[in-house]
Image (cartoon, coloured by chain):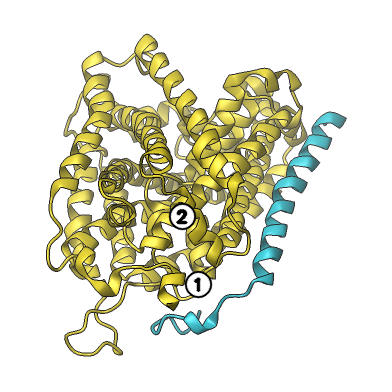
Amino acid sequence: MSTAAIVMLIIAIITVWGGLALALVNLNRHPEDDGAMPAEHAPEL
Amino acid sequence: MSSPSPQAAPGVKPKREMWSTRKVFILAAIGSAVGLGNIWRFPYVAYENGGGAFIIPYLVALLTAGIPLLFLDYAVGHRHRGSAPLAYRRLARGAEGLGWWQVAICFVICVYYAVIIAWAAMYMIFSVTEAWGDDPAGFFMGSFLQVSEDVNIGFDFVPMVLIPLIVVWAVVLLVLAAGVQKGIGRANIIFLPLLLVMFLILVVQSLFLPGAADGLNALFTPDWGALTNTTVWAAAYGQIFFSLSVAFGIMVTYASYLKHKTDLTGSGFVVGFANSGFEILAGIGVFAAVGFMAFSAGAEVGDVAAGGIGLAFIAFPTIISEAPLGGLLGVLFFGSLVFAGFTSLISIIEVIIAAVQDKLGMGRVKTTWCVGIPLALISILLFPTTTGLNLLDVTDAFVNNFGIMACALVTVLLVTYGFRKLPLLGGHVSEVSSIKLGLWWRVMVGIVSPTVLGYILISEVIKRIQEGYGDPAMPDWFVGVFGWGMAGALIVVSFLLSLIPWGRNSAANDPELDSPTLQEAQR
């Protein structure tokens, strides 16, 4: 692979998967309000 | 509605169905977004439009149109807690037709989408024996689909497609009949991780094939000149737009099953980036395999690269025949198509079921059969035939380009400038979410999105009028009826459906199902 292709492969992975990682971190910092759980839900979840 | 919960008092209607946790909602939303297009469309679109340089317009499109439109869908569905027609009806007087337009689009998509899943399921089996021999193209069009030269509607059924199609419909309707949490939620909890594991194994296997590096080189070598080309930017916005399942009711419907206090923007960013993350993964896996195909044939990657049906049912069988452990590669690839397609199909049909359920006030199981059986019959009658491929081709192209695209454009224009509801919707999302929607979001939805959607739509209309459709061109009457006519009929039908009054039993007249905003609820 050419250097340019390797660099763009790495950039694509870092931006998109890095974006996903950041989004997951943000979501985990704002936990769900369990008080508002619906009455009926599948017990295994 | 599902059957009354044990907690419900006699005579009291159960509340609207809900996801048990936001994790289930996120999985279902990713399951809907990750579909056939992620696997067979993205890699080729990226390759054709600047290779490595495509990542720039692609990310810009994701952040300036894809995710903002996703938030718009979430806002409408979550604030107004209804299927697409009911949610838009509650949003503004006169907006109900937009919801029915989205339902009509889902109706057309689901009847042909199920057929592609049936093909992929058969190809999983064919992969084991390499049933296509040394002529995958001839096998697909001839022995398998038995495509007629006559471009028409016929009822000459092909049993090898008919039987798996009946199975697909039976399974999908059983899942939907089980309800939002126990059916759709559980199906996504099982199928989405399974899809990810299968696809990861496929990517690893592809990367070890000879020529894989040449494939990746072809995909990721940047053509910076492409960035000055408007068609490349239009392709990036088009890819993001079609890939994220926005603007045709799915995310409105799924968001309506969330409890009041849910981090909508936080969840939306996860869904948006997970969908794109899967596309990058698909690009790597598919082009590594295509690189091997070029290596085996002694050809250039550009000579063998393809997208869509050509990639899946002609190029991949060639790769499977040549590759070591080809049978495994085939089962993983077609299995991934089946699972990715199945979770998307569920979401498309749910838009229709939810709409009918809200309108007629019927139970979940009864609605699923009342809606699902006619849908299945139409799908089974029209597509697993020797003439089904042309019909699928033309309806797919027109419902996407002139159904979803036009509906999205009209929706953003009406919501922004007609009904002037963006501040209200943005305020609702900000109230419950970690990332607030300010002026930037209103600019993206109200100005950037309609500009880009309008450009793509007009370019496509001009192209189709000048060039017709199909290669070789299909007869005008066929494109006129099942392309233009179908796309126009969606609008007429949605307008007529919006005129039908909501009955006493409908969700529109059920105070239990009405949705004040969180602020209103706390007053």
- Height in image: B288 above or below B118? above
Disc marking residue B1: none
Q: Residue furthest front?
A: B523
Nearest to the observer: residue B96 or residue B273: B96
Nearest to the observer: residue B102 or residue B97: B97
Nearest to the observer: residue B281 or residue B439: B439
Residue B227 image-quadrant placement: top right
Q: Is residue B246 left or right of residue B485?
A: right
Kind of residue indicated by mark 1? Lys
Badge 2: chain ID = B
Residue B502 image-quadrant placement: bottom left
Read off the residue under disc 2.
Answer: B425
Badge 1: chain ID = B
Q: For chain A, give the colour.
A: cyan
> Could you say whether the residue bearing mark 1 is in a helix, strand or loop?
loop
**Residue depicted at x 69% and y 71%:** A29
- Where's the N terminus of chain B, which quadrant? bottom left
Distance, label 1 to label 2, CA atoms, is 15 Å
What is the x, y in percent for residue B169? 29, 54
Read off the residue under disc 1.
Answer: B261
What is the x, y in percent for residue B233? 60, 26
**Residue depicted at x 22% and y 71%:** B510
> Could you say whether the residue bearing mark 2 is in a helix, strand or loop?
helix
Q: For chain B, give the colour.
A: yellow
